[in-house]
Image (spheres, grey):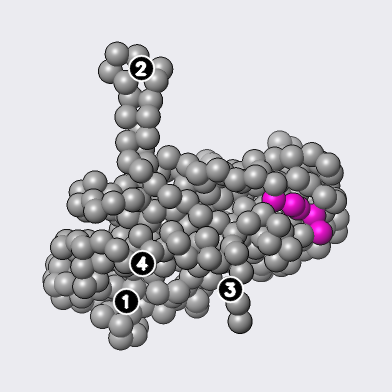
Amino acid sequence: MKPTKGLLIVSLVMVFLVSLTMINVTFASPSTYFHVEPPYMQGTPTGKFEVAVNITDAPPSYAWEIHLSWDPDRLELINLWQGDFLHRWYVDPFDPTVKYPLYNTNMAFTPLGEANAAAEILVTCTLVGDLPMEEWASGSGWLLSLEFLVQARGGASLHLFDTRLWDHIVEGYPAATYYPAVDGLVDTTDFFFAGLDGWKLKVNGKAGVSLEGGLKTNVGEQNLLEANVKNSGSLDAYVQAFFEIRDSAGYWLATIPSDVVLLPSGQSTILSATWIANGAGMYYITAYSTFYKELIQVTNVQVGTGNGVNKRFFLPLPIYPSVVVAGSVTVYLGGTPTAAYKIDYATGKITFNVAPAKFVVITADYTYHNVFPDGFSRTVRLRAV
């Protein structure tokens, strides 16, 4: 099969990656990931918007590559341009307003016509020349920007996948490592939001009041907590309610989550949980909700390297509030699965029973989602007798 023009152009850039001789080796940072910025955008039909693809906490890297896909019925890619992560800047010492690229780079991508026909683009960017590893780019920065034209109303995902950095040496040449990526969302109808509907909270079927009166229950009796949640945006969203319990002095006692529910756009539902008062007295119950668009699954992510002492490591998660899905984690020591650890799904913290040995590479497969909080409901007073 004859290769397309777009693939030929990208292949020319990849030639640079096998034309060099290097001698050093580096290890990937456990917190490296690609992401669309801003993560949520609004647009109007026939309007335009720009997004960036950024990298966070990159190890020394000679090149990067991304794939990005979108809904062709709603979006058309009309332009893109390179960021400054690889080339960086030299500022003129005599005129700080003047700056020049510090390193030569070459970026190639699928031609826009082909990209829009496939609703997917491949972009590759590399440094040029035989550079020592200490001159490769590292840290966090801007990879590229893309400009889209909104074609129709509705929600659309900007899906990043097969994202990688050429960040280490294999047999004298730069070699690639795949890293996780966080998608972006575009809403061209309303806005992406799901939360408590009118701050509605009920305890045992009654709303109660905040400052006077209140409801009654019996010590040891199970209480039904209910929050009415509505998806007010144009995208389907996963929603979850949390019920916060405080004592009469205002001290926190517990936060009880509801189940997670996929709530279609424009619809409402009641999320519930149960709670038992273990002692007599006044309790204050407040609800809040969180929402997210989709689950994000990553595999073979490097978590760290053992040193024979440290037992605690963290799964790489985005800077946005994120939660690891319970039961989704598989941890590997040197490529072998292990169950000898505990995990905090809220933070991604892994605590091994025994510290991994020196130089053992720790990797993991897991699923997470980005959590976006809503405001709090009115407070219900509940007296247990």
Earlier in the chain: of badge 2 and badge 1, it is 2
Q: Label 1's element?
A: strand
Give the foreground label among 3 and 4: 3
Which residue extends farthest bottom? 336
User: Type of residue at label 1?
Assistant: Tyr
User: Within 10 angstroms of label 3, few (less than 14), some, or many (20 or more) residues?
Assistant: few
User: Type of residue at label 2?
Assistant: Pro
Q: Mark 2 points at which residue?
A: 96
Earlier in the chain: of badge 2 and badge 3, it is 3
Q: Name the residue under label 4.
A: 176
Quarter of the image for the C terminus: give it.
Answer: bottom right
User: Type of residue at label 3?
Assistant: Pro
Earlier in the chain: of badge 4 and badge 1, it is 4
Q: Label 4's element?
A: strand
Q: Mark 1 points at which residue?
A: 341
Which residue is at the front of the view, 180 or 129? Answer: 129
Which residue is at the front of the view, 87 or 262? Answer: 87
Q: Do the residues labelled 1 and 3 touch (CB within 8 Å)?
A: no
User: Within 10 angstroms of label 2, few (less than 14), some, or many (20 or more) residues?
Assistant: few
Q: Label 3's element?
A: loop
In the image: residue 228, left or right of residue 381: right
